[in-house]
């Protein structure tokens, strides 16, 4: 009996040792604010590809509020991670996240949503990869103008739903870019309806759009812009609920993840005309790669990287994917 216990113990110890040997030297966290959103799942997928290529361990964490973010950073440190990438649930958490990371001696960089300091200014000292938000918004605006012109719509008959979420700078820059282009093209200011969303998701968009539509029931042609795909899809569903479809609606989102490909694959077109396809690969793979090289080779990432996007419609989504 005693002998058997000793053998068993030896087996456990050996198994434990081999696990230790197999454990990767580099461990990197990837924290995202909305793990249910297709965009963040894509980022994770590409970060996972970097982990395979460089042979490090990726720890994916859904960090939906400040408390979760801060305890996740402590957890990462106690698991022996050396760094993390984060899309924060609230940009104002920037100083708290930086303090927590520094206390735990973890390297970190932000992705998508840039930290804002206690003085209200962006924290330029934190390495960041984000989209060129204003220009991407302008691309949405330009495409809306082109599509209205293609359909020979008189701007005076068209309502413009701007699905806003101004508490997040990268989102407000996107909607502002779109609106500025419309104004430059003489779209009537009186037909612009800012529709503030309480939450940055499909439901938030649906509710905000319904509210605006009941107030402007005299209008029967609509264009829609928003900071991302969810912000536009909700409004498209609200418009459908009021009887407006592809003939009366031009909606353009941003992100271009699988979520909108479903929209393009429906037999009949919907009011969701296009999305600006962003590079989830760059935001997921490259940030993870930059972090790995920072940890492993002491190679500091660029302070800031801005990425671009391309218009994706029913006509070209297959080529772009
Ligand atoms: C923000 C948005 C996401 C995505 C990302 C690039 O984090 O919430 O949907 O657009 O920027």
Image (tube, helix red, strand yellow):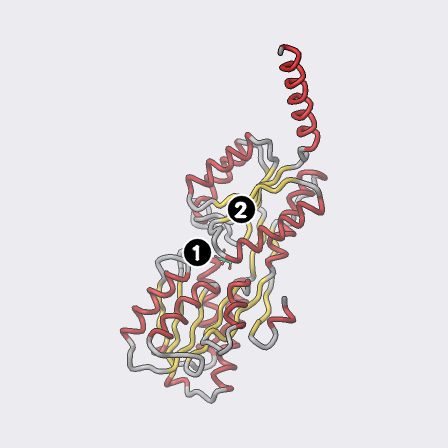
In x, y percent, where is residue 307?
Answer: 60, 60
Q: Earlier in the sequence, mark 1 or mark 2?
A: 2
Residue at the disc numbered 2? 86
In x, y percent, where is residue 72?
Answer: 49, 37
Does dot 2 land on a helix, a strand or a loop?
A: strand
Q: Is residue 11 above or below residue 315?
A: above
Quadrant into which the C terminus falls: bottom right
Left or right placement of residue 254 versus residue 281 in this view: left
Does dot 1 land on a helix, a strand or a loop?
A: loop
Nearer the viewer's eye, disc 1 or disc 2?
Answer: 2
- Mark 1 CB lies closer than 8 A to ligand 1: yes
Residue 44: numbered disc = none
User: Residue, x 46% and y 60% (percent of image)?
Assistant: 171
In x, y percent, where is residue 71?
Answer: 46, 35
Residue furthest top as drawn: 2
Residue at the disc numbered 1? 168
In x, y percent, where is residue 121?
Answer: 46, 50
Q: Residues within 10 Å of mark 1 (few under 14, many from 20)?
A: some
Q: Residues within 10 Å of mark 2 (few under 14, many from 20)?
A: many
Q: Foreground residue, 157 or 124?
A: 157
Tell me if residue 228 can be seen: yes
Q: Is residue 173 above or below residue 2?
A: below
User: Residue, x 55% and y 32% (percent of image)?
Assistant: 77
- The answer to whether the residues at label 1 and label 2 have Cβ atoms under 8 Å apart is no
Q: Is residue 166 above or below residue 115?
A: below
Q: Foreground residue, 296 or 56?
A: 56
User: Residue, x 69% and y 46% (percent of image)?
Assistant: 52
- Gap between marks 1 and 2 measured at Cα: 15 Å
């Amino acid at each position: 009996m005693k002998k058997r216990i000793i053998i068993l113990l030896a087996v456990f110890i050996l198994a434990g040792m081999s696990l230790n040997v197999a454990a990767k030297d580099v461990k990197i966290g990837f924290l995202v604010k909305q793990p249910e959103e297709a965009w963040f799942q894509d980022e994770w997928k590409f970060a996972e590809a970097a982990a395979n290529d460089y042979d490090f361990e990726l720890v994916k964490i859904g960090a939906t509020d400040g408390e979760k973010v801060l305890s996740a950073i402590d957890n990462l440190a106690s698991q022996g991670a050396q760094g993390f990438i984060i899309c924060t649930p609230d940009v104002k958490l920037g100083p708290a996240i930086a303090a927590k990371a520094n206390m735990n001696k973890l390297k970190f960089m932000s992705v998508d949503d840039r930290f804002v300091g206690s003085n209200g200014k962006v924290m330029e000292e934190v390495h960041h990869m984000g989209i060129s938000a204003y220009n991407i918004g302008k691309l949405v605006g330009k495409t809306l103008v082109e599509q209205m012109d293609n359909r020979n719509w008189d701007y005076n008959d068209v309502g413009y739903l701007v699905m806003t979420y101004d508490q997040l700078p990268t989102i407000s820059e996107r909607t502002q870019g779109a609106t500025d282009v419309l104004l430059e093209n003489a779209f009537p200011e009186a037909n612009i309806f800012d529709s503030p969303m309480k939450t940055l998701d499909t439901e938030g968009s649906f509710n905000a759009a319904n509210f605006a539509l009941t107030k402007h029931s005299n209008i029967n042609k609509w264009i829609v812009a928003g900071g991302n795909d969810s912000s536009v899809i909700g409004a498209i569903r609200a418009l459908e609920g009021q009887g407006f479809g592809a003939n009366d609606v031009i909606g353009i989102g941003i992100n271009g993840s699988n979520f909108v490909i479903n929209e393009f694959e429906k037999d009949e077109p919907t009011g969701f005309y296009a999305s600006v396809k962003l590079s989830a690969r760059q935001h997921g793979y490259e940030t993870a790669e930059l972090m790995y090289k920072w940890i492993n080779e002491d190679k500091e990432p660029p302070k800031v990287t801005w990425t671009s996007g391309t218009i994706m419609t029913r006509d070209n989504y297959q080529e772009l994917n």
